[in-house]
Image: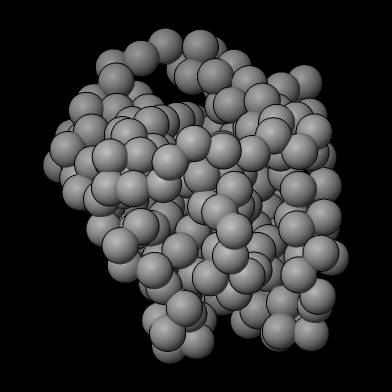
């Protein structure tokens, strides 16, 4: 009974709702699951726990969509980003462990809102797209994912600016964020941020998250490119407002 005590609370019921919303968003858009879950879990529990849960759950649940995205991944763009993230993600995780929780929560809200506004206003990266720009995007995305668990806006902004189909954009975002998630969870676990209660919550949230992810992926397969982009950005904007003012 003591083992499941963390699940018998109103806070955990809210976490289940967030997992359903995050899983659907992640399955549909290839990003945004962490944007929904991380800031709000940081309010319910603690910033470090929000980051751990939001990054760990996709590692267990995303196997459902990996076979479908593999043919669409552009490795020449994903590779440099992942290499950069390997370098900077642990550094960001260190500052998450030692930082002020209130400051971290504010940064979470600001990051999401800024990214949402930028994309909804139609801002696109019009510069060169090569190994260096991919590496720089990985530094920003990996560093912010380590610090506040929100590297997704920067990674998605870079890939959504590319002249590519929604399938390629989604595949690049989803795969990159999965790998960056590993690079965040591992150093936080080593740093002592993953206790038994956190593990229990993660395991219990896998099922609702995975089910919602499956539904989101099926909805995406029936969605046109223009609709995909519009819905993804509107949801991102809504999360940014919520995270900033809650």
Q: Residue at x 22, y 28 (%)?
A: 91
Where, quadrant-wise, is the C terminus in this rendering? top right
Q: Position of residue 221 (x, y in %)?
A: 71, 84
Say whether residue 108 is visible: yes
Q: Position of residue 193 (x, y in %)?
A: 28, 37
Q: Is residue 121 left or right of residue 81?
A: right
Front residue (pair 198, 125): 125
Q: Residue at x 56, y 54 (%)?
A: 162
Q: Is residue 9 left or right of residue 52?
A: right
Q: Using the image, determine if residue 245 lies above or below residue 223.
A: above
Front residue (pair 156, 148): 156
Q: Position of residue 52 (x, y in %)?
A: 39, 46
Where, quadrant-wise, is the N terminus in this rendering? bottom left
Q: Is residue 51 left or right of residue 119?
A: left
Q: Position of residue 110 (x, y in %)?
A: 63, 21
Q: Residue at x 56, y 37 (%)?
A: 125
Q: Residue at x 68, y 53 (%)?
A: 18
* Image coloring type: one colour
Say whether residue 152 is visible: no
Front residue (pair 36, 132): 132
Front residue (pair 143, 18): 143
Q: What is the tally of numbered marks visible in this picture?
A: 0
Quadrant location of residue 27? bottom right
Q: Using the image, determine if residue 222 lies above or below residue 216.
A: below
Quadrant location of residue 11? top right
Q: Is residue 150 left or right of residue 92?
A: right
């Amino acid at each position: 009974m003591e083992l499941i005590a963390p699940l018998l609370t109103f806070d955990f019921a809210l976490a289940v709702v967030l997992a359903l919303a995050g899983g659907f968003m992640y399955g549909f858009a290839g990003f945004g699951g962490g944007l929904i879950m991380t800031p709000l879990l940081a309010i319910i529990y603690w910033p470090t726990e929000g980051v751990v849960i939001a990054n760990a759950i996709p590692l267990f649940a995303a196997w459902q969509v990996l076979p479908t995205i593999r043919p669409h991944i552009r490795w020449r763009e994903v590779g440099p980003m992942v290499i950069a993230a390997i370098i900077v993600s642990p550094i960001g995780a260190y500052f998450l462990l030692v930082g002020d929780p209130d400051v971290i929560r504010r940064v979470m809200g600001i990051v999401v809102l800024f990214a949402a506004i930028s994309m909804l206003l139609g801002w696109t990266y019009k510069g060169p797209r090569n190994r260096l720009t991919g590496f720089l995007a990985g530094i920003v995305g990996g560093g912010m994912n380590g610090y506040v668990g929100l590297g997704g806006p920067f990674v998605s902004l870079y890939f959504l600016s590319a002249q590519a189909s929604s399938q390629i954009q989604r595949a690049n975002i989803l795969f990159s964020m999965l790998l960056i998630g590993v690079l965040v969870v591992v150093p936080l676990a080593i740093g002592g941020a993953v206790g038994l209660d956190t593990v229990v919550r993660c395991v219990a949230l896998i099922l609702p998250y995975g089910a919602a992810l499956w539904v989101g992926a099926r909805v995406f397969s029936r969605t046109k490119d223009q609709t995909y982009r519009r819905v993804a950005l509107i949801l991102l904007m809504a999360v940014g407002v919520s995270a900033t003012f809650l």
